[in-house]
Amino acid sequence: MADSDREKAANGMANLSVGDGTLDVKVEESEDFVDPWNVTSSSAKGIDYDKLIKKFGSSKIDDVLIERFEKITGKPAHHFLKRGIFFSHRDVHQVLNLYEQGKPFFLYTGRGPSSEAMHLGHLIPFIFTKWLQEVFDVPLVIQLTDDEKFFWKDMKLEEAQRLAYENVKDIIACGFDVTKTFIFSDLDFIGQCPAFYQNMVRIQRCVTFNQVKGIFGFDDSTIIGKISFPAIQAAPSFSSSFPFIFNGKKDVHCLIPCAIDQDPYFRMTRDVAPRLGLPKPALLHSSFFPALQGAQTKMSASDPNSSIFLTDTDKQIKTKINKYAFSGGGATIEEHKANGGDCDVDISYQYLRFFLEDDERLDKIRQDYTSGELLTGYLKKELIELLQPLVRAHKERRQKITDEQIKEFMTLRKLKFDY
Amino acid sequence: MADSDREKAANGMANLSVGDGTLDVKVEESEDFVDPWNVTSSSAKGIDYDKLIKKFGSSKIDDVLIERFEKITGKPAHHFLKRGIFFSHRDVHQVLNLYEQGKPFFLYTGRGPSSEAMHLGHLIPFIFTKWLQEVFDVPLVIQLTDDEKFFWKDMKLEEAQRLAYENVKDIIACGFDVTKTFIFSDLDFIGQCPAFYQNMVRIQRCVTFNQVKGIFGFDDSTIIGKISFPAIQAAPSFSSSFPFIFNGKKDVHCLIPCAIDQDPYFRMTRDVAPRLGLPKPALLHSSFFPALQGAQTKMSASDPNSSIFLTDTDKQIKTKINKYAFSGGGATIEEHKANGGDCDVDISYQYLRFFLEDDERLDKIRQDYTSGELLTGYLKKELIELLQPLVRAHKERRQKITDEQIKEFMTLRKLKFDY
């Protein structure tokens, strides 16, 4: 995909015609809001990712970076990169420089276990992280922030732990290599690793209430658990938090693939790192997976009709897509044939963009839908036939996961890498 | 000691003549200030402890409570109780009721390791806790808040840990029974005990920034480590934080002997406990050990001349007392003989009150000093001869403590009690 296409895609489902003065003004007036708990956009086309890059001060993933990925790994770039689904980064060139010098990094990603059933959107960082792990052959740590969910949601601590355990199954089902991957839940792990707690404390000493207030929107009525939590999400960015993996080495660089809404945590982490004499983590940011009803907001795990869940049956997938997937087509067949469909708002097309790996086929669909030749119904059918076996296979892999396997992934241990 | 005497003593070194209108007004105008980091009084006679009881909402230790102690344990009350050195409490009757019903409590005390050398004042809670452990035969947990010191002081984390380790030696030298005592440093222990971290998190969920702001005087520029720290000092109040001792039992009541400046932490803890379905800790509060220079402030470990340190030589003890111990005697011998000395401000007398166990002898000294028969020099000599062997014996016991012994005290393990 050419830079301009990717720019369009990174602009995301927004893709505003910037030549139009009226629209321009509208964009200026309507601020998107993105933090770890709320993502809202007043535009029907979703978040303006270019504006977000400017606002957050990150860098756009451009052709140069993608070519470096391909050159260094000797493999084609993942379609999430080529299609601008991962669209923004911080310091990835630096991590790749070090990698080329024989100083490999480690990967860190995570999940807040807010519900038992994960949806397709939750898979995005894990699918991409798995690819990164495969092509770079590096250690990976995956944090389940069950303490965070306990602070933010109305649930018992034991329930947060149970959800974390259930989510770990879905994560393992993505196919991570147990010899390269350590998965942990905060509520279990922090009480097993003094080095991790000590890094939490070091970070908590560098950050004031004023700072987290500004970054996370806390106020005086915020519970103290939430106030100190950012340090807990920051701590895995440092290799010294995992002495059993890195043998006490403090300078192994970290690369964090995550959705862009998690960036506030890591802006804070990157601010703190030099004061602790530790390397700043690098980041790869993904855009949001849209809800079936449209790109205006992030999906909600609490609304079963807002997305395809990893527990859905073939029938549920079919019904949901046919009934709820927002169409970018014309109001009538005649109108559609005359004006064509709008891929940028059509949710079936957008989902295909995430999951249909075949670039040529996706491009053909885009052309034929845009020209009006294909109807929305065709895109829905294509998507249903793609997702049904994908979800079915995930469920099968998940079902086979044993308690022993989970225990292995979650045991503090040396991975296959020597330090 | 009669109630009225103890009241005077509890009024402390203050002991104001309440009949004097002028003084009364002065007391109303000059508020003492007591929180875990600052103790200040504008009165030359120190903190007004009766006012503090009213302000904190605790209860005075009266003859009824002391008689119950003696009745239940079958042993004479400790002179710290009889002399009003421990002068205030919360819910101790309730804990004693349960004890009489065969439901024994556990003891919890602690120390913030801010310096390597501990002084005599630091021993007070440990001497008293040791007595409580002996007469009640119950488990004891001792927390070293090295994380707190790291947050509050300008020191490296490793230095806070080192100070904790050095302080543990002084604590063990007080003579605690290793089969009944678990000593832990936060920076080491929290990463070894998921149940403790989980209780921290439960507490942190019940307390807002507004609350800690009010209790501890935090503001927007306070680091987030300090803001969440109160939960860490609260957590040992609950038996469920130590599953290896209490076998997972959540309802073993806790009694906390501590200096009154630590009460804000436990007011918060007692507020949170019922919301967690856990028993409120009971408390026994001590007054402050005065500085050699006088009772106006708490001693400072950073000023070597403000107190007798547990590392002082015989000669240092002699010199410091002779040179710095504030005298309540007359300006000249003649004046002293005519008007007598003032025990309530004389530091040598006050130190004897803490460390001279013989009630009759102390009483005789009081009478003879008050009448003017004894000069300050005599009190100083008496104190020097009492403290030199006491500190020498402490140093000898401390020197003999091995790393293995320390390790044993600090190992997570079952104590000699079955649950």
Image: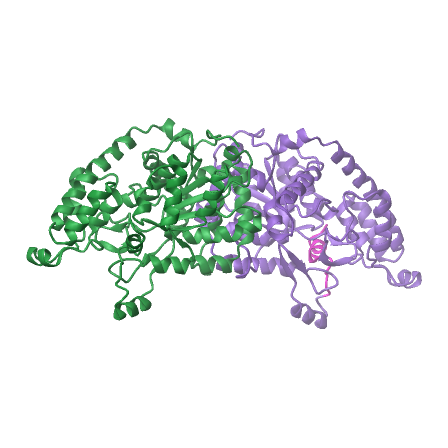
Chain colours: A green, B purple
Q: Check residue A331 for magenta coloring.
A: no
| Quarter holding residue A198 | top right
Q: Nearer the viewer, residue A250 or A231?
A: A250
Residue A151 pos. (x, y %): 41, 49
Left or right, residue B36 beside residue A31? right
Residue at coordinates 29% horizontally, 32% vertically from top-left? A398
Picture residue at 88% right of the left edge, 58% below the top: B372
| Residue A198 vertical placement versus A17 (above, below) | above
Q: Is residue B151 left or right of residue B353?
A: left
Query: Residue placed farthest to the right in the image?
Result: B334
Q: Is residue B253 left or right of residue B6?
A: left
Q: Is residue B230 visible?
A: no
Q: Position of residue A223 (x, y in %)?
A: 45, 54
Q: Is residue B6 magenta?
A: yes
In the rendered structure, which segment of residues is drawn in magenta?
B1-17
Above or below, A133 against A323 in this view is: above
Q: Quadrant of residue B218?
A: bottom right
In the rendered image, the vertical position of residue A385 relative to residue B20, given as above or below: above
Give A398 or A385, whichever is nearer the viewer: A385
Q: Nearer the viewer, residue B58 or A153?
A: A153
In this picture, residue A175 sits left or right of residue B274: left
Picture coordinates of residue B268 (x, y %)?
Answer: 52, 53
Residue sitting nearer the eye, A307 or B93 = A307
Q: Quadrant of residue A354?
A: top left
Q: What x and y, as percent, mark residue A289?
A: 28, 49
